[in-house]
């Protein structure tokens, strides 16, 4: 594991000459780097308590570890929190790789082995939720509890902009110069609540060489003109066991509709759904305090039963009817 010299590498990716982050708004991140199957992976850590299982926070597409900035400190009060940049994102490397969902899951599983954690709780936002689902399929023994936040992989519907980004080779060959400038527009359209400085930092990360290739290949593997291609329900019957699962979703999400949370809760018994009224795609930005409280309630609750697939003739039967037990914050 390589940890020396991280500050020098970090500064080269930040705007304003790599100026230090304001201490009043920034958690005391401990930055780490390691090479995982040839991929230079970055993650930040908070907390060092071993009384509770480690918590892994996975960000979404074209995002980075800093998306969890407003909630990470509250979650790290009594547990170790690890916040990676997925390959092709943030301060991690951008190799010439497939960027298929299974590849992401493999890299993250190898990373868990490298940092020496097991029996973890995983929170995945948007595309990070899709990665978490693939990890559950391939490496269920690692996951104690799973939380999906505005998650991909639960239905076909998705924003038109991401469908257009799946057009073969256009973004990969022509999009690099636009990756940084378009970040702010994308964040505004999806309802992210970030300061001008935060947008500038993320834009600088997304402007790094190789970002367009990573973005285009990721989108192409998961989305086409009809919508999302990969679905939890395609592989659900392969799962021999499910951990306790919670779903957090804003009911005004314009990227992935809240109805996907309903679908999962109808198809899988025991899903705990928390609806964030008036929130868009980033409930952890818009309601950070409530997000932390609800997440801690789920992770710390005793004797939470595992989720269980409702099957008919061996296949999950998703439905769009409102499921019993969906909690609203109103």
Image (spheres, rainbow, N blue to C red):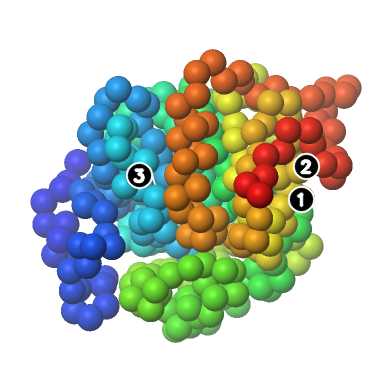
**Residue found 87% across the figure and 24% down from its top:** 312
Can residue 173 be spotted in the picture? no
Q: How many marks?
A: 3
Q: Is residue 180 visible?
A: yes
CA gap, disc 2 and disc 1: 6 Å
Name the residue tied to disc 1: 259
Mark 3, Cα crowd under 10 Å, few <14 / some 14-19 / many 20+, is some
Q: Is residue 119 above or below residue 273?
A: above
| Position in image of residue 231 (x %, y %) | 70, 44
Residue under circle 2? 263
Is 172 displayed left or right of 306 in the figure? Answer: left
Check the image and report above or below for 115 versus 231: above
At numbered mark 2, what does the secondary structure look like: helix, strand or loop?
helix
**Residue with the mark numbered 3:** 74
Q: Residues within 10 Å of mark 1 (few under 14, many from 20)?
A: some
State the residue at coordinates (18%, 79%).
Answer: 17
Rounded to the nearest whole Å, what is the CA distance between mark 2 and mark 3? 30 Å
Q: Measure how far apart labels 3 and 1 are at the Cα level.
A: 29 Å
């Amino acid at each position: 594991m390589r940890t020396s010299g991280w500050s020098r590498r970090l500064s080269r990716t930040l705007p304003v000459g790599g100026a230090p982050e304001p201490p009043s708004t920034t958690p005391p991140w401990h930055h780490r780097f390691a090479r995982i199957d040839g991929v230079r992976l970055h993650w930040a850590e908070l907390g060092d308590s071993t009384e509770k299982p480690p918590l892994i926070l996975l960000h979404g597409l074209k995002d980075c570890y800093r998306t969890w900035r407003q909630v990470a400190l509250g979650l790290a009060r009594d547990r170790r929190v690890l916040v990676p940049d997925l390959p092709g994102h943030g301060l991690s490397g951008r190799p010439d790789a497939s960027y298929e969902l299974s590849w992401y899951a493999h890299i993250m599983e190898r990373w868990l082995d490298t940092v020496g954690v097991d029996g973890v709780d995983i929170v995945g936002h948007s595309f990070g939720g899709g990665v978490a689902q693939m990890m559950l399929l391939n490496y269920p023994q690692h996951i104690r509890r799973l939380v999906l936040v505005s998650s991909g992989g639960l239905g076909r519907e998705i924003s038109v902009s991401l469908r257009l980004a799946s057009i073969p080779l256009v973004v990969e060959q022509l999009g690099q110069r636009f990756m940084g400038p378009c970040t702010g527009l994308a964040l505004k359209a999806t309802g992210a609540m970030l300061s001008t400085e935060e947008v500038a930092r993320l834009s600088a990360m997304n402007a790094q060489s190789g970002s367009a290739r990573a973005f285009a290949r990721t989108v192409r593997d998961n989305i086409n003109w009809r919508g999302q291609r990969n679905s939890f329900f395609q592989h659900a019957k392969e799962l021999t066991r499910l951990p306790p699962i919670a779903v957090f979703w804003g009911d005004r999400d314009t990227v992935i509709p809240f109805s996907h949370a309903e679908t999962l809760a109808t198809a899988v018994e025991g899903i705990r759904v928390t609806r964030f009224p008036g929130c868009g795609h980033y409930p952890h930005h818009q309601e950070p305090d409530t997000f932390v409280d609800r997440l801690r309630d789920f992770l710390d609750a005793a004797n939470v039963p595992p989720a269980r697939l409702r099957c008919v003739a061996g296949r999950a039967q998703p439905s769009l009817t409102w499921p019993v037990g969906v909690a609203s914050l109103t």
